[in-house]
Amino acid sequence: MKRWITWGLGALIVVLLAAGVLRAMGARKAQQTALAEQTVRSAQTVVELAAADVLLLQPQELLRGLPVSGTLKAANSAYVKARVPGELQGLAVREGDAVQAGQVIARIDPAEYEARLRQAQLQADSARAQVEIAQRQYDNNKALVDQGFISTTALDTSLSNLNAARATHAAALAAADVARKSMADTTLRAPMDGLVSQRLAQPGERVAIDARIVEIVDLSRMEIEAALSAADSVGVRVGQRAELRVEGHAQPVPARVARINPSTQAGSRSVLVYLQLQSVPGLRQGLFVQGTLGTEKLKTLAVPLEAVRTDKPQPYLQLVDGDKIRHVSVSLGLRGRVADQDLVAVSGLPEGSRILAGSVGPLREGTQVKLGTQP
């Protein structure tokens, strides 16, 4: 009897263990099924895209360019210098003041030059009096020769004296002109319209000849002087366009090649190219400028640089293929800037392909998308 009870208890334990195992297997299978369904639902999440999020791959006109840099300077500038030595008087203009061509900037003390002019004028008057005396003597001698009272030798002597007096008078007049010119040079005038950029002397100073008084710049025409290698300069032509970034200015400034130096620089063998900038308010002499000089136009398939993804070994674009995203590797080429946007030439996709803009961010390959309508 005890044996049957033992067998019965063993069978009951086996049945209970089998039931527990079956129940555990069923729960695990249900969990796996739920996880699979959740994965499928997650994989089928649809990303809705706005019209601005999708770009068409189209040909763009890019400029093949050379990097240029330099310092901004006025195309027209001049120094007002002292033409005669003396004490500087009446200098009232300062940095930033506007001046006009012919405007009196300052004066050199004219007292000494007025005295020299009077001296030269008096010497000229004295020489003219000597000419009159010599002329009367010649006329008298000529009359006496005609009457036979004196020889022609005396007439020749009086003629020589007259010619000498005339030469002395001419020299005195020239000296008076020089003194008059020095007197006029005591007044310093602006040679052109512009703004005073430097004041290099102070009133009351005694300045020497060619001493710089003020510098005047004309900001209506600005340019930079860019140095290019001999190889790069071969493709540069007058009139070619450039896009420059000026220090302190957010927007690029258009420019064009105005002149090309016909000679290379000693030592570096570089060629100087002068780029004239379009007139833009706020440009100042001395600002640093850099940008790209376009030497050749090329029409090719191009996309915004920010649309190219580089989180894989090869750069790729996110292609909208039907209703899914596909990653397509591309080769990058020429870079350029169009309408204040950086573009890069790409190859590996046909024209008209729809790609995601860089503002969308990365999407997993195979992600389903839905294109929205343009508002």
Image (tube, rainbow, N blue to C red):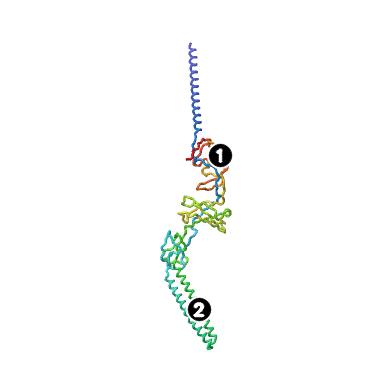
Q: Classify 10 Å Cα crowding around label 1: few (below 14), some (14-19), many (20 and above).
A: some
Q: Is residue 189 left or right of residue 265?
A: left
The residue tagged 1 is 328
Q: Position of residue 360 (x, y in %)?
A: 49, 40
Which of the two residues, 64 or 94, is positioned nearer the viewer here? Answer: 64
Which of the two residues, 335 or 258, is positioned nearer the viewer here? Answer: 258
Q: Is residue 235 left or right of residue 185?
A: right
The residue tagged 2 is 166
Q: Classify 10 Å Cα crowding around label 2: few (below 14), some (14-19), many (20 and above).
A: many
The kind of secondary structure element at disc 1 is strand
| Quadrant of the rendered image containing residue 197 | bottom left
Which of the two residues, 304 or 136, is positioned nearer the viewer here? Answer: 136
The answer, for residue 212, to whether it is visible in the render is no
The answer, for residue 322, to whether it is visible in the render is yes
Residue at the image point whose x is 49% and y is 77% from the top: 169
Above or below: residue 17 compared with residue 68: above
Above or below: residue 41 compared with residue 188: above
Spatial CA span between label 2 and label 1: 99 Å
Residue at the image point whose x is 46% and y is 77% from the top: 125
Q: Position of residue 277 (x, y in %)?
A: 50, 55
Residue reaching furthest to the top:
1
Mark linked to residue 63: none
Above or below: residue 51 compared with residue 219: above
For the residue marked with disc 1, what is the amino acid? Val
Q: Give whichever of discs 2 and 1 has the lower sequence position.
A: 2
The kind of secondary structure element at disc 2 is helix
For the residue marked with disc 2, what is the amino acid? Arg
Query: Mark 2 against mark 1, which lies toward the viewer?
Result: 2
Q: Position of residue 13 (x, y in %)?
A: 48, 18
Q: Position of residue 72 (x, y in %)?
A: 49, 55
